[in-house]
Image (tube, rainbow, N blue to C red):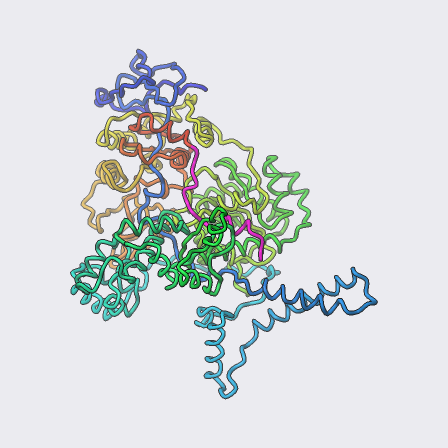
Amino acid sequence: MTALPRGETPGSPAADDDAVVAPPSADVPAPSAGDGTETEGGAPGTGGPAEATDGGTDDAADGEPAGAADGRTDDGPDGAGVPDDSADGPTDDEPAEAAEDTADGAGADAAPAQLSEAEAELAAQRELRERIEKRKAEKAGPIAAGGKLSGKAADLLAAVRAVESGEQSATSFFDSPAPAAPRRTAPEPAPARPRAPEPARAPQSASPQAVAATAAVLAEGGAPAALAGPAAEALGAQAADALRVDPWQLLAVPGVRPEQADGFARALLGAACGPDDERRTAALVGWLLERAALRGHTALDASEVRAALAERSVTDPDAAVQHAVAEGVVLVFQDDGQDGQDHDGQGAGASAESGEEPGADAERAGQEPVQVLLGLDRYALAEESLADGLARLVNACEKDADWTEAASAASSPSAAELIRAVAAHGLVAHTGGEAARAEPAALITAARALGLRALGATHSADGRRRLAAATGDPEAAVTLAGLLSGEQGPGRDEEGAVAVDLLVVLDAPQLDVETAAILVESLADGTRLVLSGDPGVLGSAGAGRVFADVLAARACPQIVSRTPDPGPIGELVSGIGIGELNQVEAPGKEVVIVPVHDAGEAVHRTVQLVADSVPRAIGVPSSDTQVITVGHGGSAGTRALNAALKQRLNPGPGRFGGFDPGDRVVHVPAPGRAEPGVVVSADAEGLHLDCAGTKVVVAQERVESSVRHGWALSAHQAAGMRWPAVVVVLPGDAAQGLSRSWVYTAFSRGERHLSVVHGVDQALPRAVAQPPAQDRTTRLRTLLETPAR
């Protein structure tokens, strides 16, 4: 273990010399005597910062960097997922039909005595395939109408019968196209469509009449009138009637808590409501699952839900859960891969009616009961659709492609290994740090040289820029959001599939389950998919842990990069990834520690570093230096730091909704997406931003909710992006939230320089040494590991 260099913090004014006082610690050696410019030498540390000063400026103790709080709590409203209403989960219909056809086929082909056993088996298989294709064709065809009806009436009757029988979902009849046959790779790329930058528009709001009616009901219950608009958007045009019948539906409005909904219900219903009101318990179950989704869970253990209900004065949590399942508020599953309910919902209803959960039979038989999970249908459908889509890509790929020459010309052994794996498989996982991003870039370049339509998708515009530079072709890189929206990329073929033969998704840990389901559904049969990313960084802002589940299920070949991240920052981050917080040699002040005692000093030191020290000593301007801190609130959160940095770097009255031209901001166009930008101007259209060269206009009514100052970001917002210099702020109150993933993510965002404003003492090495836990409950791994039934 080597020691950090002992030297000055990226220069600081002499006026602040007396402000740096080293915190007493047995693990921190006393500063060595210096000549007023730089202190040399130092002994290896044991996890705490080793300090050195050049006369007591803001010069850092050049010891260990520090971590910060857990990523799920630092992003608040930015952590919500985006619904995927198009993700359809698989059903059991086809396996059941296949079983029947196997029996029928075997009986039919066993009769001819002149056939050998092998010939009979082949004949049975042929007949089985023919029967399956026939039944699929029958399902895709029109449904016969009632005998005494004709025209639209007959078609409506047939549609109702199809939904009641479970043959088709109700959503399939709402102006959606008929299910297409399995897609094939398009022979020619779809022509690129001209695209013009569009303003960031506000989501469609409810009608004024609906808002007014909702406001009247809210007023009766003593709820704020400001909730009328969000309630009408969440509950629809009939929000007023819905709230009057079931006041607890107010919990569907973001930000409303159970105690607030209880007060509203008491005001409307009086003595008619109580803690065990079935309307209340059903709403609470749904609210608990929605809150869990904000923390990344796609499901929760039923025992956790029952415990949470008991904490909220529900006297019979078991009955409450059973009622919620029976009402369709949540779905129930078992962790052995056998769903606790059938796809038509009958299993769940039966469990609720019998008063038992799935797994009760095993418990009575003396077996260890299986884990029972509760989940919302949107995430259940997304996970099932994703698992089915990944299996489709694995099975539909051409596996005898010869890319030997491309692999032999690869720039590194790891890149060659990746190219060979992709040539033989439809789905490949690739892991590695920042330096390993060169390997997917080499794969994309090699595939395009072979004449394939290869494309790389990144989490952020910054990632897209870096990928385009690595491939040397701007057309080879898109953002994932731009690809799915059609604003970037080659467009779609005549069947609606993205017109690519190979898609490489970088920053794969940032994929939430709903986005991943939409993406995989958009890929044609035969398309190769590569999921590439660093498994050590924080997960997606939305629900799910797609990349981690794919790796854990071993659903495809996994290529581990052998390319290490270079320099002192790379060495430091690589050690953190395996649980070691090592001191590193940093002769060029690549890593610097600034010890602080409290949050006020942390804010002061951060402003000094960004505005003066880093530009003067490292040569990185303030505009290229990013501050990363624990969360948005608190005395050293993003709000406090942004206010201090604005006052120093771009003071102004904030005449455009709190913003001035030149302000660094972050635009959040959708939950989980953060786009850094700069304020250009404002007018009647809204706030004009420049986001990495893209002109964005944010409507006035959306500015407050979707634009924040961006000198300081949370670690989740910073994931997928890098800057020449990064200042990580760790105030003392961050100690309880430290995790290895947070430290790893924050420290790896700097390309040339990392300063750590350190106020958490020994909490940092403890957090790094603690193995990362499975902090999200999901079903995808089980679905990938469970053979298709």
Q: In this view, does 565 lie to the left or right of 703?
A: right
Specify the principal SS of the magenta part: loop
Residue ranking furthest to the right: 114
Q: Can you say whether 339 is above or below 760 in the image?
A: below
- Residue displayed at 41% across by 22% down: 583
Q: Is 283 inside the magenta-drawn segment?
A: no
Name the quadrant of the C terminus: bottom right
Residue 684: image x %, image y %?
Answer: 24, 59
Name the quadrant of the N terminus: top left
Q: Can you say whether 306 is above or below 442 in the image?
A: below
Q: Give the range drawn in magenta.
A: 771-789
Residue 478: image x %, image y %?
Answer: 47, 50
Q: Can you say whether 507 is above or below 486 in the image?
A: above
- Residue displayed at 69% across by 50% down: 400
Residue 234: image x %, image y %?
Answer: 30, 62
Dividing the picture into quadrants, the one containing residue 186 is bottom right
Dividing the picture into quadrants, the one containing residue 238 is bottom left
Q: In this view, does 397 lie to the left or right of 230?
A: right
Q: As rendered, which of 288 and 293 lies closer to the eye?
A: 288
Q: In this view, does 140 lie to the left or right of 661?
A: right
- Residue displayed at 46% across by 84% down: 153
Q: As rendered, which of 179 and 408 lies closer to the eye?
A: 179
